[in-house]
Amino acid sequence: MLKKVFRGIRFSPVYKSAPLGLLDQAEFLNATAAFKTKLSPEKVSVKLKEIEKKLKKNPPVRFGPRTIDLDLLLHGNEIRLEDELTIPHLRLHARRFVLQPLLDLGAGEIVHPGFERKLKTYRKEVEKQKCRKTSIRLIP
């Protein structure tokens, strides 16, 4: 679905990580994607929510198991702190299962718009968080 909406999309390797918040559940699969778009952050967010709806995202509890969870992590140097849209994602630099796949896509030199630090500089801060690469590959 994503590749139909966002041409030229590239996917990171898939990682397994322990759940946060609600701990009594299975590990999560995580990956990131990169693509160029002329769409505004709001329009990208709407497209992501449409895909989640088609895939029946409906966690029974906050941070509980879900079929899909698509977040807009970055959109150029944009900063938005609104009820419906927050970019950059508030915790992308503090969660290994988000940061590592971003780095795998070559995002290490990107400067975090909110903190003015390159993303690769956060790697040491998250390295103790359990997160392991799987053999699963998403088809571009």
Image: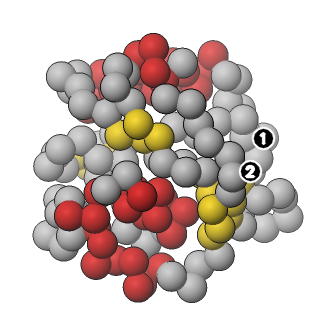
Who's the residue at 43% across and 63% down the image?
99
Disc number for residue 108:
none
Residue 26: percent from left, percent from top: 83, 57
Kind of residue sitting beneath label 2: Gly
* Tag 1 near tag 2, CB within 8 Å: yes
Kind of residue sitting beneath label 1: Pro
Secondary structure type for disc 2? loop
Is residue 7 visible in the rendered image? The answer is yes
The number of numbered badges drawn on the structure is: 2
Whether residue 49 is situated above or below residue 88 in the rendered picture: above
For the N terminus, which image quadrant? top right
Residue 35: quarter of image: top left
- Location of mark 1 (residue): 60
- Pick the residue in front: 14 or 74: 14
| Spatial CA span between label 1 and label 2 | 6 Å
Residue 128: percent from left, percent from top: 57, 85
Side of 58 where 120 appears, left or right: left
Who's the residue at 47% across and 41% down the image?
11
Whether residue 71 is situated above or below residue 96 in the rendered picture: above
Secondary structure type for disc 1? loop
Q: Residues within 10 Å of mark 2 (few under 14, many from 20)?
A: some
- Location of mark 2 (residue): 64
- Pick the residue in front: 84 or 119: 119
Residue 54: percent from left, percent from top: 63, 16
Side of 46 where 2 appears, left or right: right
Q: Residues within 10 Å of mark 1 (few under 14, many from 20)?
A: few
- Colouring chosen for the image of the structure: secondary structure
Residue 57: quarter of image: top right
Residue 44: percent from left, percent from top: 33, 26
Side of 121 where 50 appears, left or right: right
Who's the residue at 30% across and 22% down the image?
43
Whether residue 60 is situated above or below residue 50 in the rendered picture: below
